[in-house]
Structure formats: C-alpha cells, structure tokens
Image (cartoon, helix red, strand yellow):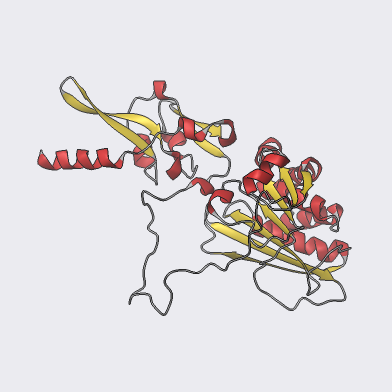
Amino acid sequence: MLTTTNELGYYEIRLESIGGLGANVAGKILAEAGVIGSGLNALNFASYGSEKKGSPVKSYIRFAPKEKQIRINSPVVQPHLVAIFHENMVNTNPVTQGLRKDGIVILNTSKSVDEARDFLKLASGTVATVDAIRIALEVKTRINMVMLGAIVRMLGFISLDSVKEVIKQTFEKKYPQTIASNLAGLEAGYNQVESKFFEYDGKYQYVEYQEERRPMGYKNAPIGGTIVEYANTITKNNMTSRIGKIPVFVKEKCINCGLCETTCPDYVFVWDRIIENGKPKMINMGLDYQYCKGCLRCVDICPAGALVEGIEREYDIEKISAKHDFDIYEKWYEDGEKR
C-alpha cells in the first residue's frame, strides 16, 4: 500500500543511470510488479538519446492507488525516490535535483551511508547504499538486478515475490539461463542495502529541479545544424562510461609495441619521447583515466600482459593515472614538421 504520494496522488521514482546498466529494464520490471503483485496503477518510460553504452539514461516510474488513473506522462522532476546506478554520475550530473526533502536516494557505492550523504551533498532525507558492482560480479548478474532489489526494499509497498515472478516471465523465453543469477542479485540487493535518515542540519542545501536548456535550438542553430560536443576533446570526461572495471597498466611488462594505442578509441595512453642510441624512442607511460570508458579492448590486444583487467574501486585512480601533456605533444608535432 502506498504510504505517501504527491499532490496529484502519485508516488514518483527516477532512476539515474547510463546505457548498458539496465535501468530501462529495471523500471519496466518494477512498474509491472506494482501492477500485478501490489494492485497499483503504474506508468513507466525512459528518457535517453542513442541509449549507447555510457550515455546518460533516465527511467521514470509512477505509482498510484488502483482507483486512481495516472494521466500524465512527463519526466519526474520531484521524485520520492532516486536510484543512482553509477557512482561517477554524481560528479558530472545533477542526479539528486528535485528530490523531496523527505525523499530516498539509493546509491551504488562501497561507501558507508554517512560517507554517501557527504558525497551526494544531500540536505535531508534517507540515504541508502548498496555495493551493486561487487554483488553483480559475485553472483554473475547485472547491476540493475541488484539495484532493483535495493529499490524494492526501500519502497516497502512492492512485493519482492511479485518482482521475482516478473523477472522469470521477462527472461524465460530468450535468456532462461540468466534467471537464477538475476534472482540471486535481486535478493542480495534487497538484503544488503543499508540506510539512514538525515534531518536537515544546514550542512548542505536542497537542490531544486532545473530544466536542462541547450544554448542552441531550432531558433538560433546555424543552417545545417551544429555539433556542440565533439567526439573527443581535451576537456571530455569518460569516467561515467565505466561500469566497474578498468585496464590496469603494468609498466615493467610493457614492450612499447603500441598495439594498445592503435586499438584504443579514445586516445587514453600517454607517451613520452626519449633519445636512445641517438634515435628518438616512444615510451608508454600508462593511461590517462579521464578519457577511459573501460571498454578493455587494450587488455584483449596486449601481447605482453602489461594491461590487465581490474576492479576500479580497488585503485586510487588519481594515483595511478598518467596525464596527457598537450603542450609537449604540440612541440613534438612542430619538431616533426621542421624535420
């Protein structure tokens, strides 16, 4: 039974994620379980661009008592609950904006609840944490199943058994081999989520919802359109594209063959030029993780074992990251032109 609703009589949820983590599917399963298992009316839809891996995705769910119809189909701007599927999104997206002052935010993180509150800079409300990446790796499921379990636990009015039934129906035809691990991830998220309510103490301020407006639109865009963000720039940050795994550079094993450079789609690798026996030689200094989206293509192609798969949370990214020196690159280019 719904314990709280907004002025329209709806309970509203917003899932903040990136393409590839399954927030869209999680939203559909949650809405269907609310209808079938809890006798509610529900509406779900997602908002995304290309829905490619790494691009922002939002999934919206509205619940209402069975006797009340849901007559709006617009983005959720003042959610009762926000679930953040990717921890790095907090640094690059206003994921908690509009959250009600007594709302719930669930974060996929290994941080404690108190650490998560400070990380989110949440003014008040309930903070819940679950290490969805670790659990997903342990039970061999996807992050969305773990987050779904945590969401069901924090909501309190959706039956866990009804969610299990919807999962079985969703995957039994095409992916029956995933049902057992998906259910294991759901239960682990349900059982392992931790939460704490924070009263407003003035430490952080409430963040109002603001509609995102692009600087150019149909009224002022140049003829032929415009590209406002190029595929790669020195300011681009691909951290939110990573879903838990990163390539780790083992410098002593590197043979400087350059295969990692040729296969990397984002120019992640940092190179230094030295003079050896009177001739210039390029030395691989490692990865600049600002540009790495965790595709692990470099790990697959490295012939020397100098690049290995690692769990991002186990490393201090700032400490192990090399940094591009674009001024040096420009100088090398100019020297080459002179020669």
| Residue lying at 80% horizontally and 46% vertically, measured from the top left | 190
Place residue 271 in its image quadrant: top left
Pick the front one: 289 or 52: 289
Q: Position of residue 23 (x, y in %)?
A: 65, 56
- Answer left or right for 238 relative to 23: left
| Residue lying at 81% horizontally and 50% vertically, measured from the top left | 153
- Answer left or right for 204 relative to 56: right
Q: Position of residue 225 (x, y in %)?
A: 36, 73
Q: Is residue 141 visible?
A: no
The quadrant the N terminus occupies is: bottom right
Place residue 216 in its image quadrant: bottom left
Q: Is residue 323 visible?
A: yes
Label total for image = 0
Pick the front one: 90 or 299: 90
| Residue lying at 33% horizontally and 75% vertically, measured from the top left | 222
Vertical comparison of 35 with 294: above or below = below
Pick the front one: 139 or 157: 157
The quadrant the C terminus occupies is: top left
Pick the front one: 97 or 183: 97
Q: Residue furthest front?
A: 202
Q: Position of residue 261 (x, y in %)?
A: 35, 38
